[in-house]
Amino acid sequence: MSFTGRPESFLDTTVANNGFFPVLPMREFQETYRVPAELAESAVARQLVIARDYVNDQLTKQQAQWQSQAHASLEAVDIAEGAQLVEWYKDAVFNRAKAHLLTDFETFTRRASAAEISDDADPISQSLLARAKRALRRLRGQKGTITAELL
């Protein structure tokens, strides 16, 4: 049961993907990343699609490299390398989607507390976006948080 007293009804739908990267279960996103079940399915799905597209665009070169090594999916790479890449992928997408849901929060509610929560949401959103970036770096094989390039 949620804090509102209403039973939590998590979404049992998924967001499709491009065939290489995994489908994204909305239930997992809501449960694992503590996204309120009260949010409209369309709002949750929209942010997941936007985050998925961003992450997929960021991984275009890496996907081509994996496919050139005869891997048909990220799960196949994961099995071959034992690196939990599917979890890193979901972490990148889900953190990015949650960050954007938080910035949209003020439009979900018009209570006076929404303004205060909105003020707090910016640092939290930035932290979630930083987590998403770290997950993307792990997927690209970059273990640290800084990359230097010789020009």
Image: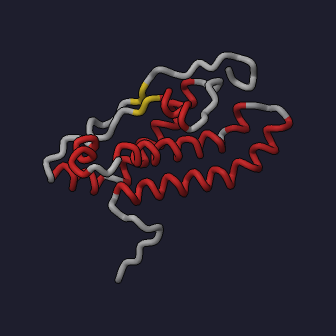
Q: Is residue 2 left or right of residue 76?
A: right
Location of residue 3 (image quadrant): top right
The residue depicted at 37 percent of the width and 78 percent of the height is 149
Looking at the rendering, in which quadrant would you find the N terminus?
Answer: top right
Tally the marks: 0
Q: Position of residue 56 (x, y in %)?
A: 36, 47
The relative height of residue 116 versus residue 129 in the rendered view (above or below) is above
The residue at 57%/51% (across/down) is: 128
The quarter of the image holding the C terminus is bottom left
Locate residue 94 relative to residue 99 in the image: left or right: left
Position above or below: 52 against 111: below
> How far across and down, in percent of the image, does residue 104 sit?
65, 39
Closer to us: 56 or 34: 34
Residue at x 50% of width, y 30% of height:
45
Residue that protrudes farthest toward the right in the picture: 112
**In-front residue for pair 129/32:** 32
Name the residue furthest front: 82
The x, y position of residue 131, in whole percent, is 52, 54
Q: Nearer the viewer, residue 45 or 24?
A: 24
Residue 31: x %, y % from top left: 55, 31
Q: Residue furthest bottom?
A: 151
Q: Residue at x 48, y 36 (%)?
A: 48
Q: How is the image coloured?
A: secondary structure
* Image: 45 above or below 138: above
Q: Does 81 sit left or right of 45 as displayed?
A: left
